[in-house]
Image (spheres, rainbow, N blue to C red):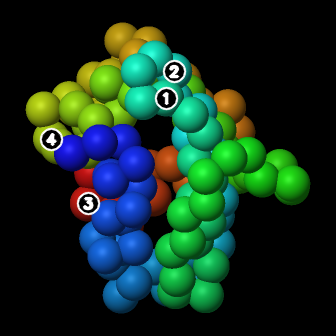
Amino acid sequence: MSVADIFNSMPGRFQADKAAGANMSILFDLSGDEGGQYYVNIADGQLAVTPGAPAAAPSATVKMTAEDFAGMSSGSLNPMMAFMTGKIKVDGDLNSVMKFQSLVGF
């Protein structure tokens, strides 16, 4: 599954029942082959994905390789281990990123 396919599948994987009161925006800044920027916004029980950087500052920015992102979304890369070993870098609200993971099933 390509990185674009993973982001396109997020609205279907989104667990709206667990998102009560969640309002956050995360910019994924992916490097390498299939890299790019993807903005994910969660508000009012909805998840929306937009390619590119947002006009407003996101709650958090996640920087990693597209390959590691694909591994994390497939379950072959543990997100916590990737963060602890420096494969994932987070600028901003780390709690939003952790909540995001639980809402999309990573």
Residue receiving disc 2: 31
Q: Tell me residue 69's x, y (percent).
A: 35, 34
Residue 102 visible here: no
Say if 16 sits above or below 10 in the image. below
Give the residue at the far right of this rendering.
Answer: 55
Cα–Cα span, label 4 and label 1 = 19 Å
Mark toward the start of the polypeptide (2 vs 3): 2
Which label sits on residue 75? 4
Assess whether mark 2 and mark 1 are in contact (beta carbons under 8 angstroms): yes
Residue receiving disc 3: 105
Task: Please identify the quarter of the rendering in which residue 9 is found.
Answer: bottom left
Which is nearer the eye, 13 or 95?
Answer: 13
Name the residue located 32 percent from the left edge and 52 percent from the top edge: 6
Q: Secondary structure at mark 1?
A: loop
Q: Tell me residue 40's x, y (percent).
A: 57, 59
Q: Tell me residue 39's x, y (percent).
A: 62, 53
Type of amino acid at the residue the image marks with label 3: Gly
Q: Which quadrant, please, contains the N terminus? A: top left
Which tag is nearer the camera, tag 4 or tag 1?
1
Q: Tell me residue 98's x, y (percent).
A: 44, 49
Label 1 Cα crowd, 10 Å radius (few <14 / some 14-19 / many 20+): some
Type of amino acid at the residue the image marks with label 2: Ser
Mark toward the start of the polypeptide (4 vs 2): 2
